[in-house]
Image (cartoon, rainbow, N blue to C red):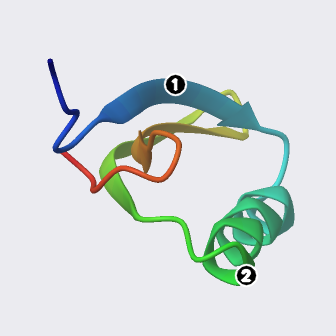
């Protein structure tokens, strides 16, 4: 038998505005999701963010 102790998903997201990014972070906090911002970069006036998010209800890896 196996048991998942921790799991996460890496996502590379592109936001049109800083406001859109803040809405996404607010959404994660409201849902009590664990996350870590791994990298953040502005590209052509847009915000590119590499974020590690909690997968299902497992602890963040």
First in sequence, mark 2 or 1: give its number.
1
Crowdedness near tag 2: few (<14), some (14–19) or many (≥20) residues, C-alpha within 10 Å: few
Which residue does the image show at 43% across and 48% down from the upper left? 54
User: Relative to the observer, which residue lies in front, 3 or 33?
Assistant: 3
Q: Is residue 5 left or right of residue 26?
A: left
Which residue does the image show at 36% across and 50% down from the upper left? 58
Residue at which label 1 appears:
12
Label 1: state its secondary structure. Answer: strand
Which residue does the image show at 85% across and 41% down from the upper left? 16
Label pair 2/1, CB-CB below 8 angstroms:
no
Residue at which label 2 appears:
30
Q: Quadrant of the C terminus?
A: top left
Q: Is residue 23 left or right of residue 3?
A: right
**Disc number placed over residue 21 in the picture, else none:** none
Q: Quadrant of the N terminus?
A: top left
Quadrant of the rendered structure where residue 31 is? bottom right
Q: Is residue 19 left or right of residue 56?
A: right
Vertical comparison of 24 with 39: above or below: below
User: Relative to the observer, which residue lies in front, 35 or 50?
Assistant: 35
Quadrant of the rendered structure where residue 10 is? top left
Indicate the position of residue 37 as horizontal and vertical percent values: 36, 54
Quadrant of the rendered structure where residue 25 is? bottom right
In three-dimensional space, the C-alpha distance between marks 2 and 1, rounded to whole angstroms, equals 21 Å
User: Relative to the observer, which residue lies in front, 31 or 5?
Assistant: 5
State which mark lies toward you, 2 or 1. 2
Label 2: state its secondary structure. Answer: helix
Q: How many marks?
A: 2
Vertical comparison of 3 with 39: above or below: above
Crowdedness near tag 1: few (<14), some (14–19) or many (≥20) residues, C-alpha within 10 Å: few
Which residue does the image show at 19% across and 32% down from the upper left? 3
User: Relative to the observer, which residue lies in front, 35 or 40?
Assistant: 35
Indicate the position of residue 49 as horizontal and vertical percent values: 50, 40
């Amino acid at each position: 038998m196996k048991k998942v102790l921790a799991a996460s998903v890496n996502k590379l997201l592109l936001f049109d505005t800083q406001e859109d990014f803040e809405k996404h972070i607010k959404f994660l906090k409201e849902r009590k999701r664990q996350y870590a911002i791994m990298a953040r970069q502005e590209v052509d006036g847009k915000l590119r963010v590499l974020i590690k998010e909690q997968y299902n209800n497992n602890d963040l890896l």
